Image (spheres, rainbow, N blue to C red):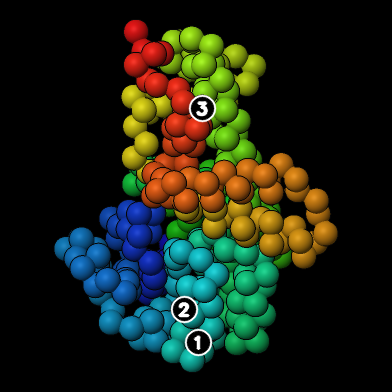
């Protein structure tokens, strides 16, 4: 697709949550013609102020867009938004492109793909890795699967949203890889929480322990990203325990369908249930260490200098 063709595209965006909000803004700031829809219309004001167009229904947005992005919460939401009579597939013009950037199950994504193919709509799976800050900076990691031609046509738009973009395959590969990564992130955080609580019980200084672990053989990008907030014990959510539970459910449901044993993932899933059950579901998932401290009877005053 030429630069002129790109500039004439009518882009629709559905979903203005913590991640979708800045991503849509970046498209508008890049000079794209963007229409936005969100059930909470208050969330569209910033986009309208920058030149975006607020649309009152998905049906209207779908019928007027050449490319539609969705960034929504879960399988239930994408099923309603994409597959209902008033949704995207039923009301989008043939040869339009649907780019779903949400974290959903491969099974639900396959249902969307089948419906899109029947309607001759191009469907690209494009889940993301990254934080709200990376979404704001346009530096997300984007994992793509779908027809290679669809990926190539949409790449200039994706490059506005991400700094590292990977083409994974033609089917649900991007969904599987996204869930692989999220499972490993969640397992890593549980491992770190247990190690920190263990170290505290042994009298280790909190900040020193974090510095040494992050510099050791088990140091990792996720640990280094969380290093300073862990030191401050700031569990303001970048990604909540409840969200992690939802993603682990997607992993385990898919694993069951494929008969893949995942004993570690199954065990760690219970950690998120415990956090939710103890009132920590809306805290950052790294707050797991706080729950362990409570269970172990560790008093912070005993370990702080």
CA distance separating discs 1 and 2: 6 Å
Label 1, residues with CA under 10 Å away: few <14, some 14-19, many ≥20? some
- Judge by depth and name the residue closer to the eye, 20 or 99: 20
Instruction: List the single residue furthest toward the front.
Output: 297
Residue designated by label 1: 84
Residue designated by label 2: 81
Q: Where is residue 144 in the image (x, y as percent from the top left)?
A: 60, 57
Query: Are the residues at dot 1 and dot 3 in contact (C-beta closer than 8 Å)?
Result: no
Instruction: List the single residue furthest toward the bottom.
Output: 85
Name the secondary structure under disc 1: loop
Name the secondary structure under disc 2: helix
Q: Quadrant of the C terminus?
A: top left
Q: Which of marks 1 and 3 is nearer the N terminus?
A: 1
On the picture, is 232 further left or further right than 6?
A: left
On the picture, is 196 further left or further right than 23?
A: right
- Judge by depth and name the residue closer to the eye, 192 or 35: 192
Query: Are the residues at dot 2 and dot 3 in contact (C-beta closer than 8 Å)?
Result: no
Name the secondary structure under disc 3: helix
**Which tag is nearer the camera, tag 1 or tag 3?**
3
Q: Residue at x 44, y 65 (%)?
A: 72
Label 2, residues with CA under 10 Å away: few <14, some 14-19, many ≥20? some
């Amino acid at each position: 697709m030429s630069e002129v063709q790109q500039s004439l595209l009518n882009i629709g965006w559905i979903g203005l949550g913590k991640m979708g909000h800045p991503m849509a803004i970046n498209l508008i700031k890049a000079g794209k013609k963007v229409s936005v829809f969100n059930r909470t219309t208050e969330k569209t004001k910033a986009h309208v102020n920058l030149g975006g167009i607020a649309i009152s229904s998905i049906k209207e947005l779908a019928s007027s867009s050449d490319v539609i992005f969705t960034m929504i919460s879960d399988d239930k939401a994408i099923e309603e938004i994409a597959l209902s009579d008033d949704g995207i597939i039923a009301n989008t013009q043939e040869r339009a492109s649907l780019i779903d950037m949400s974290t959903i199950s491969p099974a639900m994504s396959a249902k969307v793909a089948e419906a899109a193919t029947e309607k001759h709509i191009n469907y690209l799976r494009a889940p993301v890795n990254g934080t709200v800050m990376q979404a704001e900076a346009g530096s997300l990691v984007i994992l793509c699967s779908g027809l290679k031609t669809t990926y190539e046509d949409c790449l200039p738009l994706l490059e506005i949203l991400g700094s590292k973009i990977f083409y994974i395959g033609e089917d649900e590969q991007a969904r599987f890889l996204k869930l692989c990564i999220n499972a490993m992130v969640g397992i890593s955080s549980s491992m770190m929480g247990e190690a920190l609580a263990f170290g505290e019980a042994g009298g280790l200084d909190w900040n020193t322990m974090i510095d040494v672990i992050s510099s050791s053989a088990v140091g990792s990008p996720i640990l280094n990203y969380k290093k300073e907030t862990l030191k401050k014990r700031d569990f303001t959510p970048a990604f909540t325990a409840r969200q992690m539970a939802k993603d682990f459910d997607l992993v385990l449901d898919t694993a069951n369908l494929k008969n893949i044993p995942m004993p570690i993932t199954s065990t760690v899933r219970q950690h998120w249930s415990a956090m939710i059950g103890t009132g920590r579901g809306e805290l950052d998932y790294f707050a797991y260490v706080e729950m362990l401290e409570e269970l172990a009877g560790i008093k912070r005053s005993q370990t702080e200098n």
